[in-house]
Image (cartoon, rainbow, N blue to C red):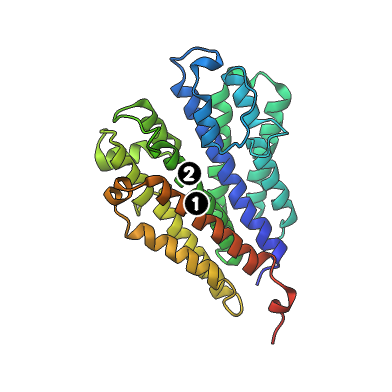
Amino acid sequence: MLLSRVADSLYWIGRYLERAERTARLVDVRLDLGLDRMSNAGGWDFARLYSMVQLEEAPSAANPMALSDTLVFDPSNPAAVQACVTAARENAAQVREEISTDMWEKLNALFLRLKQARAEGGWSARPHYIFRLVIDGIHLFEGVTDETMGHGEGWQHLQLGRFLERASATAALVDLHFRRELILPPGHAEWLGLLRSCSALEAYCRCYTADLRPERIAEFLLLNPEFPRSVRFAAARVESALRAISGLTTGGAGGRAERLAGRLHASLDYGQVDEILSEDPHVYLETISRYCAQIHGAVYQSYITYPIESALPA
């Protein structure tokens, strides 16, 4: 069984990098969608972006570039991309003996490139370059992780953090677009933005063609069992990681977390999009978010903050 501090660091590396990649992609897509709008704040749908990145307090940004700077580099914003990458690197430094040299080098290189871009300034003239740097850097780290780290307990904690963060964030993103007072007509540019924000546009078009219907988008992002960024796929990976961790630890410590993950996965396995949308999709999606929060709490109780007596042999 891993030391609790090691499990905690690996779990948060997965969560922080998933969060950084998501924020970079959301801001990148939002800038694209706003290209035909006015350059001042009144022409940009900033409020929707604040909700997408789950900011409780909206930053004071006068224009899109100022907003991008807040969400990418602002040191006072703990959800900023650079803050998340820095936190992931700090966690990686604490468990350097558990990760491969290639993993450390890729994460450290991403951290240094962001730091250099911030120091040099002028990045606002090419914001998409920064977002692509972050997204590609994190994808590279994940690929190297899969190829160079043993797929044991530590790797499973990384996967658990990554996919639990993804399930919760995707559910929140879909919820934002399917609240009854905010729902948009078919074909609206925001549906295109939602799919692009989940790297799902091409995969959706292969499945449904380019007909952007809200009910099909909801079905694809929530219930598709094969697309890696759907909530159902992420929930399956969370359950799989928890089962593997439980099997590798003495006494099957994570029983509650496993049960919660199993219930979440089952609710998505047997979900029907017409039933979800005919009732109140907000309630259904909030339930998913609540399950994710409960799984997080159960993981901490079982593997991170457990009493020392439970880890001692009987």
Tell me which amino acid carries mark 1: Ser
On the rendered structure, is 293 left or right of 225? right
Residue 269: horizontal and vertical position, in percent? 34, 59
Q: Residue 172, which numbered label? A: 2
Alpha-carbon distance for marks 1 and 2? Answer: 7 Å
On the rendered structure, is 28 left or right of 92? left
Dot 1 and dot 2 residues touching (CB under 8 Å): yes
Reading the image, the residue beneath label 1 is: 289
Q: Give the residue drawn at x 48%, y 44%.
A: 172
Q: Secondary structure at mark 1?
A: helix
Decide: few, some or many residues near mark 1? Use Cα within 10 Å; few <14, some 14-19, many ≥20: many
Residue 26 against residue 261 in the figure, above or below? above
Say which label, 1 or 2, has the lower sequence index.
Answer: 2
Tell me which amino acid carries mark 2: Ala
Quadrant containing the C terminus is: bottom right
Quadrant containing the N terminus is: bottom right
Residue 299: horizontal and vertical position, in percent? 60, 64
Residue 271 against residue 259 in the figure, above or below? above
Can residue 204 be seen at all in this image of the molecule?
Answer: yes
Can residue 147 be seen at all in this image of the molecule?
Answer: no
Residue 117 image-quadrant placement:
top right
On the rendered structure, is 227 left or right of 76? left
Q: Secondary structure at mark 2?
A: helix
